Image (cartoon, coloured by chain):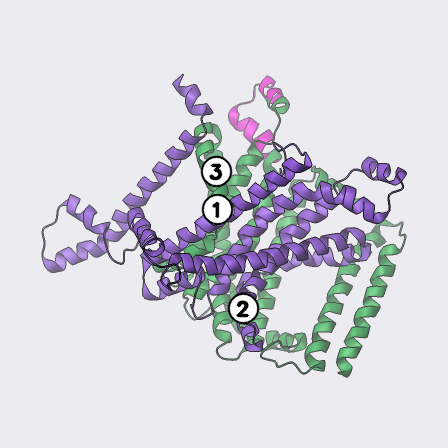
Chain colours: A green, B purple
Amino acid sequence: MNIFVYALIFWIISWALNEWLVRLNIRLKYFQQLRDILVPILFGAALLGLWEGTTRGFGISEILLPPPSMIWERIIESKQILWVDFQQTFMKAALIGFVLGCGSGFLVAIAIDRSPFLQKGLLPIGNFVSALPIIGVAPIMVMWFGFDWPSKAAVVIIMTFFPMLVNTVSGLAASGSMERDLMQTYASSYWQTLFKLRLPMAAPFIFNALKINSTLAMIGAIVAEFFGTPTVGMGFRISTGFGRMNVDLVWAEIAVAALAGSVFYGVIVLIERAVTFWHPSVRNRATV
Amino acid sequence: MNKNFLARSKSIPLLTVIAAIIAIWYVGAVWMNSPWQLDRYEKAGVDWKFSQLVEDTLSQKRPVLPAAHQVIEEIWKTTVLKKITSKRSLVYHTWITFSATMLGFIFGTLLGIFLAVLIVHNRAVDKSMMPWVIASQTIPILAIAPMIIVVLNAVGISGLLPKAFISTYLSFFPVVVGMVKGLRSPEISQLDLMRTYNANNQQLFWKLRWPSSMPYLFTSLKVAVAISLVGAIVGELPTGAVAGLGARLLAGSYYGQTIQIWSALFAAAALAAALVMLVGAVDRIVMKRMGFDTGKAGG
């Protein structure tokens, strides 16, 4: 009980501190940025503290919800297993599927760009398929491509293809007729217009798809493993860890998956900011 | 005339592409099912003609890729010809998945709106929580879905609620992001006008922020309902394959019943389409009553 009270006090203090921090009138930009990082970290720490305090304070069974400190210990202990699973699920299935799915979606979008007929035919289907629970094809892919990572990559390819297709096509339509006319007066060819005007204009849309797909790729790779795997992989470990009461290992896998997913997303955001530096949502970032 | 007609029409390109997909499907079915069929011919020592091969590959019991008519036949058998209460009825399984989806979707929407209102009105919540709301989605929650189900089962919560919980977690995110954007969409001049009317915070919210957030809300709801269906289906995977479309998928993959998997997939697709259309219909009605330009709404 005591520990829970401490955790609660910690929570309240950090909340009060956050309230104080955001009300501070800071002039220096550097300190503003520091605060914007500090506030969510404090919130996260308070959340972890509350978790630790609740599980230890009320003596919640480790099988139901292990405290964060125990999960951390487990991560340190079984680095080897986690690394092997990470390679299998993330580096092979998710990443390869992501690259192939996004790449083919992008190429198909370029290919149908010149044909309004194909666009009109494919776009409604693409929009429709994007709303479908595509993860359901996982058992079929496992049947077709076997238990190892190719079947998982195939699921990821199908999941990431359509968001990329739809977003790229609408991105390619984003440049205005004025700008296109200007390119025409420069006597630029189709490909020059594409590379110099339309693709840069489409970049925000394409990155939007990449961000959506980064989470989809992780989900696809892990969930597909529930339908059959060799004895390695994050999804395999998660689904079998329970039967063996290795709950802390399951949570360790989840922590790794969360970290990998966040870093994956973060890298895409960083690239986006570098590529689309001209876009209002990036330019205004410093002031908003 | 012909070219103009083709370029303007909406349904002809769509139908052409659909026809192409079905054609590819059949060719694929023949191609993927033929190794097994040829193997059988060889064992039986039968001379085979191509037409016979096509016919046989399209009517296998456990094909690698079932043909479209087989899937439709299976769907027909398990919906119309079976009693709805029967455990083999697809309608029964679809209903179970649908109820979990809706429950999760409603919870998720309410939670999302609540969080968005908090975020818009309190700077500390905004600064400290928004990054975590975004981070929460980079966590492959679906991966934890089986665990949440097992944990909740251990605590004694079973049936609909655990699945709905996963749907909630998945669907609250688009709603939060959309609503925060929507509640902040009134322009400064509009906010100023409200202030000159001496409107208090509550009036500001109900008369300006809330109405102007509606298009954003419905755009997010369409995403949310689709994703909450995914959550419900994945949530059904670990429950020992009892009921629901996810359970049908898993059972089908255990026993190699490909036609069953495909029919469950089609049912899921139909359900997704119906849900999105339902939200779209509500969207149009609300927008119309509020006097939004329906051509632009939700965009």
The range drawn in magenta is A181-200
Label 3 residue SS: helix
The percent position of residue A53, horizontal first and vertical second, equals 73, 77
Q: In terms of image quadrants, where is residue A273?
A: top right
Label 2 residue SS: helix
**Residue holding disc 1:** B273
The percent position of residue A26, horizontal first and vertical second, equals 89, 52
Q: Residues within 10 Å of mark 3 (few under 14, many from 20)?
A: some
Q: Is residue B136 above or below residue B50?
A: below
Between disc 2 and disc 1, the foreground one is 1
User: Residue A183, which numbered label?
Assistant: none
Q: CA distance from mark 1 to mark 3?
A: 12 Å
For badge 2, the amino acid type reads Trp
Specify whether residue B298 is painted magenta: no
Horizontally, residue A115 falls left or right of residue B19, namely right
**Residue holding disc 2:** A83
Horizontally, residue A204 falls left or right of residue A21, namely left
User: Residue A124, which numbered label?
Assistant: 3
For badge 3, the amino acid type reads Pro
Q: Residues within 10 Å of mark 2 (few under 14, many from 20)?
A: some
Question: Which secondary structure is most common in the magenta stretch?
Answer: helix
